[in-house]
Structure formats: structure tokens, C-alpha cells
Image: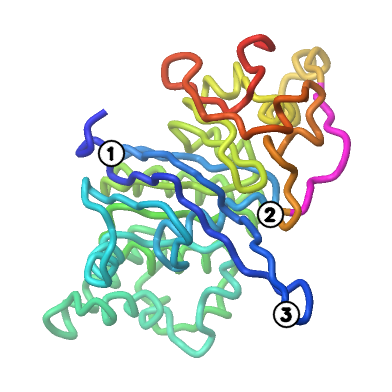
Amino acid sequence: MSQVENLVEVKNLKEYFSINTGLFSSKPLKAVDDVSFAIRKGETLGLVGESGCGKTTVGRTLLHLYKPTAGEVWFNGKKIVTKQDIAEFRKKTAMVFQDPYSSLNPRMTVSDIIGEPLDIHKMYANKQERSEKILAMMEKVGLNSEHASRYAHEFSGGQRQRIGIARSLVTNPEFVVCDEPVSALDVSIQAQVINMFDELQREMGLTYLFIAHDLLVVRHISDRIAVMYLGKLVELADAKEIYDHPLHPYSKSLMSAVPVPDPKVARANQRVVLHGDIPSPLNAPSGCPFRTRCPHACDVCAERMPELKELSSGHFVACHRAEELN
């Protein structure tokens, strides 16, 4: 695949946080450990996994909100290295945060919240152009122009998230990291917001990294899905393929937990229940991080981390026994 076809490429990304374990000792918490993937232009890559597996850290490190411990981020075929690169990169990227209650400044009006990225990047010639850009963006996300002078606390959760989305997209970015953007919303509003993400993607030519733990939401919006476990990428494939034929034991367990609307199908489905607790990323198991909960673990799993390799076209899995088990 050519460099140009991929908008974003992440190569061997690592993000370790130093955690104090005693008076003079510290230990690295490996939040993201050697993760690689690429996202094509106009595509939505879903990133799923349990809480604490490093999904959000991947999104934030990718955007250089955290300085990567190691690894490379490429954007439009160009490696992001210098401060100048990061500044240019940030003009073309944005992030939609999870919680619409804490991510908006209560002292600012809606038009100032949405207009702040325009101010930071100096993306207008005069006040009128600024105002036009803000109102046009509000219309795109389903907010009225009379909402502009009101404050965030006067709105419902769904409307606040629309304000947050308008703020992220007002600079007309190419790439957006959506960090669990609907998990704080009511189910009835989730569908509206997800459909809006779809429409905005078509209208504005956006590329998404969509982070979530709700597998039904991810399936609806994603072209491909990546599964993370304890800082590692364990499987990556087309959305339909990973739902119908998961290859990694962890993905199988996740997919078996997705509710099915048809009662007959639901009864026939076998839940794959995992035993044991998720290990702490501070004391991750040697070798494959999933081995302590995996029913198929053997000696080699403790010795080394399996490589993420392509088993069938476009379907990557990191499991020593994937071929014999599937």
C-alpha cells in the first residue's frame, strides 16, 4: 500500500508513564506498547478494548498531546518530528472528547467555545469571517444560530456533544480522533450523534480514529476495527470480518458478548466467558499479555509476544496459535 493512500500511519508507537513505586524507585507503566497501524483517507478505523487497555492513550499520543516514548507518526506521507511539524499537524487534526460536561468551558459562550480553535490557529481575516464560520459549523451539527450567545450548561448532554464536535471540526481538519464520543450520552441520542458523524464524514471528507468500548456503535460506524488488550494490538480486520470471524481468543470473547436482536440467534450463540482479572499494566505478564486469561495458552505464549501477522487478506492477528485454533 502506498504512503499517499494512507492518511495516518503509526509505526511501533510506545507510550510509557513513569510511576513512583517507592521513595526513590519508579517503574514504567506501558500504556501503549509497540502499536502499529495505518488509516486510509476517508476511512473510519474503530479501536476497541476494555477500559484501561490504552485506547485513549493511543489517540492522544498519535496527536502528540502526549510525547511518544518511542515510535513514529506519519501524516500524509510525512513523518511528524519537529515542533513545526507538530504545529502543522495539529491544524489538520482534531479530537472529540468523551465527556461533553467537562470538556467545555462553563464561562464561555457557545460561539466562543466553537471559535477558540479559529483564534488559536488564526484562521480568519476579520470578525465577520469568524462569525460566518462558527454559524455555518453550528448549522452542520444541528444547532440554531440563536444558541451562539448561550452558555454550555444551558444545554442537554447531546447538544453539548454537538457543541464539542462543532469546536473540533470548525478548523476543517482532515483527521479526527473520536474518543468515546457517545458513551456519556443516552442511547436514544447516541444513534443521532453517530449518524451525524457519518454525514459529516461524507460532507467534509473526514478520516476518523473512532475509540469506543461499545461494539455495536463501532460496528455501525467503522470500516475496519482494531482490538487492543493491555497496551498491545491483538487483531485488526474489516469490521464485518472481525464480527463474523474473530481469530484472537480475546476478540472471540468480546464479539460473543455483543447483544443480538434476534432471540433464536442469541440463544444459539455461545458466550465465551473469560476467567481471571485483567493484569495491571504495571506488572504485565511476560510474552503475550492475554495468556493469563487465555484458555489456549501454552509455553511459547509466556516466552515471547506474538507478532501481528496477516493470516488472510487484510486480517491481522497476534496469536501464536491462531492458525491451529481457527
Say what amino acid the circle numbered 2 marks: Gly
CB under 8 Å between callouts 3 and 2?
no
Q: Where does the magenta region start and end?
A: 271-280
Residue at point 55% right, 33% down?
219
Q: Which residue is identified by label 2?
A: 52
Left or right: where does residue 171 sit relative to residue 238? left
Q: Nearer the viewer, mark 1 or mark 3?
A: 3
Check disc 1 and report the residue beneath it: 6
Q: Secondary structure at mark 1?
A: strand
Looking at the image, which residue is at 19% across and 75% down? 123
In the rendering, at what x and y percent does residue 268 appear?
Answer: 80, 12
Q: Is residue 258 visible?
A: no
Q: Position of residue 57 (x, y in %)?
A: 55, 58
Residue type highlighted by circle 3: Phe
Distance (Cα) linking label 1 and label 2: 28 Å
Checking the image for residue 24, the label placed there is 3
- Residue occupying image coordinates x 27% and y 51%: 75
- Tell me: residue 91, above or below residue 4: below
Asked if residue 20 is among those painted magenta in the image, a careful observer would answer no
Between 132 and 180, the one nearer to me in the picture:
180
Magenta-colored segment: predominant secondary structure = loop
- In the rendering, at what x and y percent does residue 233 appear? 56, 39
Q: CA distance from mark 1 to mark 3?
A: 44 Å
